[in-house]
Amino acid sequence: MAPFADEESGQEHAPLHASERAPLLPSAAVKAPPPSSGIESDRTRHMLGAAYMVAMGMCGVVLVALGSTLEELAEHCGRVSTTIGSVFIARGFGAVFGAVASAQLYRAFHGNTVIVWALLALSALLLWLPYVTNVWALHGAFLCLGLCTAVTDTGCQIMTRRAHGCRAGPWLGANTVAFGLSGALVPCISYATDRLIIQYALMSAMGVSAAIAFIALPTPEKQRGFIGKRPPPPPVTVGGSSGGSGLRGFVYLYRIEFTIGFMIFWLIGGKVGATAYLTQYVADTGIIPDARAPLLIAVLWLAITVGRILGIQAQRTITLSKLHKQCAGLFIGGAAAAALPLVLLHSAAALWIAVALYGTLNGPCVGYCYDLNNRITFPSETGMSIVMFGLNCGSSFIPFAISGLWDATQWPSILFVFLVVSHLLPFPALLTARRLHTKSLKGVA
């Protein structure tokens, strides 16, 4: 949702330019309450922030596991990974439903309670997954996993914004670091043991441990300073136009969130596609030995994590204008890195370098998008659900598109074509988000 005049002044961790501190809005504009700094107790706020990082990490475990073990899961069903790409569509439908339902779930129930049940469901599904030998059952498992991860990661971001208020930016980025660190554990586990049952049992135990940690925490809704649940304010009326009603009015009201969701759709879709099909790329091209494929995925996620850690450090002091510039540089740089294997087709060194550079430059991007959303939009369950809708759709539909075109063309390099595109398309969306934000500050419809 477009920001209001006094919201911009609340960026304590990232002071804005003078023109951004005092934007001019029409006298008819509805003003938001002063920005909140979140829960007053630092200890409680930090404990909750750490818990949301752990839960977000569990989502990273699931996402990377489904991609990195897809070949083995397919073999259990008598298939190969590129012929069952439709499981990502099944996951996508679950994720779409989960993202849409999250706004209502986190309004109706205590946020931590919803997250606990979602984590326990994830753990049970992970225990069952290695025993699936039917393609349709595998689709059902992916659908349920998509639903549970969408409810969990959307909830983590919603609750982080409520708990930390205008200081949420670095914590939203920290959630993505936890996501990346946990995701990097999956190929390391795969490298240590090739028994799928043990791998998924360990991941399931992580989910149960995360759920237990939440049970021991204080209820955030009862803490002083917690940003309570409230309906979104009415849209600003400028020149007699409020953007319309129905679907058109809804899209207008959350136009910035939809734009940022589009950026995240491509950024997350590219990295999930790389995780899912780098193993198949290695097998089809023979550039490096098949046994090195898990290590290649580990390099990808370790690089992503390094990028995210560096991004968090920058987020602590970065201004909004510099955030836009760094996003643009990361988008273009990531596309250039992903193009390297398309130029040096038979070079093993180029593959390793490209994966490492792509991961490092992709790493901060999603966290930066969350921070951008936190700075230029009004906090609401619906708005955050829209952004996470983009994430969950991208992590499902982009891998499916990669597998479909790969299977149709029998051209392994299609993977890196998608990685290039996934970093180029967010750039015009970034420019659009900046333009929409500027218009909102000036009160232009």
Image: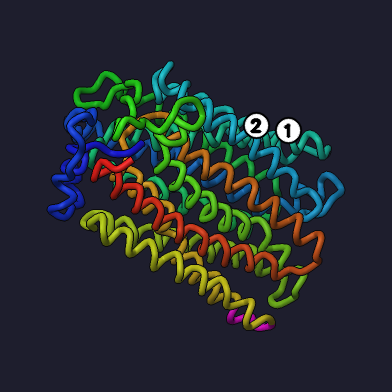
Q: Which residues are magenta?
A: 346-350
x, y (%) of residue 93? 65, 35
Q: Is residue 92 left or right of residue 407?
A: left
Q: Main secondary structure of the magenta part?
A: helix
x, y (%) of residue 139? 74, 37
On the image, which quarter does residue 272 sit in? Answer: bottom right
Q: Residue at x 47, y 21 (%)?
A: 105
Q: Is residue 437 left or right of residue 195?
A: left
Residue most toward the front? 239
User: Dot 2 corresponds to which residue?
Assistant: 144
Badge 1 vs badge 2, beta-carbon distance below 8 Å: yes
x, y (%) of residue 245? 45, 26
Which element type, helix, strand or loop, lies under badge 1? helix
Q: Which mark is residue 140?
A: 1
Q: Residue at x 47, y 53 (%)?
A: 180
Placement of 242 over or under 181, stated as above or below: above
Q: Residue at x 24, y 36 (%)?
A: 4
On whether residue 413 falls in the magenta region, the answer is no
Placement of 359 over or under 134, stated as above or below: below
